[in-house]
């Protein structure tokens, strides 16, 4: 005799990011071309924008410490080693990801 299983929960598609995740991937430059172009042509300017957004010194923007601070503030999984690898291997991508995340959290009203 076959058992009838009733579905009690229907999965939902959500465009809002889940808590504790990056809003975009490390290599998602096309998701915000303005940030990517700013980083490519004026890396220091983008670093200062990130630092200003987070209330830190301008020279801290493209650093492992800034990425780690941001990641822990928003409970994004990872480690200091992961942050260091991202900054060491692709500093432009890491900084752009951080700025895109800040911009999206500002739009959502969840940036603090």
Image (cartoon, rainbow, N blue to C red):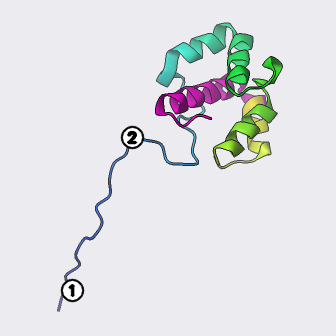
How many callouts does the rendering have? 2
For label 2, count other residues whose C-alpha is less than 10 Å away and answer few (under 14), some (14-19) or many (20+): few
Is 14 placed left or right of 109 in the picture? left
Looking at the image, is mark 2 or mark 1 earlier in the sequence? 1
Which residue carries the number 1 mark?
Answer: 3
**47 vs 54: above or below:** above
Residue at 19%, 82% in the rendered image:
4
The front one of 18 and 80 is: 18
**Residue 43 drawn in magenta:** no
| Magenta span dominant secondary structure | helix
- Residue lying at the far bottom of the rendered structure: 1
Q: Is residue 111 magenta?
A: yes
Res. 42 visible in picture: yes
Q: Locate residue 1 relative to residue 89 in the image: left or right.
A: left
| Left or right, 20 with reference to 80 | left
Looking at the picture, how far across and down is residue 15, in whole percent? 39, 40
Q: Which residue position holds label 2?
A: 15
Q: Quadrant of the N terminus?
A: bottom left
Q: Which residues are magenta?
A: 88-112
- Residue farthest toward the left in the current orientation of the protein: 1
Q: Relative to residue 70, is residue 78 depicted above or below?
A: below
Q: Is residue 78 above or below residue 22?
A: below
Secondary structure under tag 2 reads: loop
Observer-side mark, 2 or 1, equals: 2
Residue drawn 67% across and 29% down? 94
Dot 1 crowding, Cα within 10 Å, few <14, some 14–19, many 20+: few
Residue 36 locus on image (x, y percent): 58, 17
């Amino acid at each position: 005799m076959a058992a009838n299983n009733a579905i009690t929960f229907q999965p939902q598609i959500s465009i809002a990011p889940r808590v504790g995740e990056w809003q975009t991937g490390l290599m998602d430059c096309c998701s915000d071309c303005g940030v990517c172009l700013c980083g490519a042509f004026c890396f220091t300017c983008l670093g200062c924008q990130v630092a200003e957004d987070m209330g830190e010194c301008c020279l801290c923007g493209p650093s492992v410490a800034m990425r780690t601070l941001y990641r822990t503030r928003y409970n994004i999984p990872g480690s200091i080693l992961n942050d260091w690898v991202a900054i060491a291997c692709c500093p432009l991508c890491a900084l752009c990801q951080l700025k895109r995340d800040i911009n999206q959290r500002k739009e959502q009203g969840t940036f603090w």
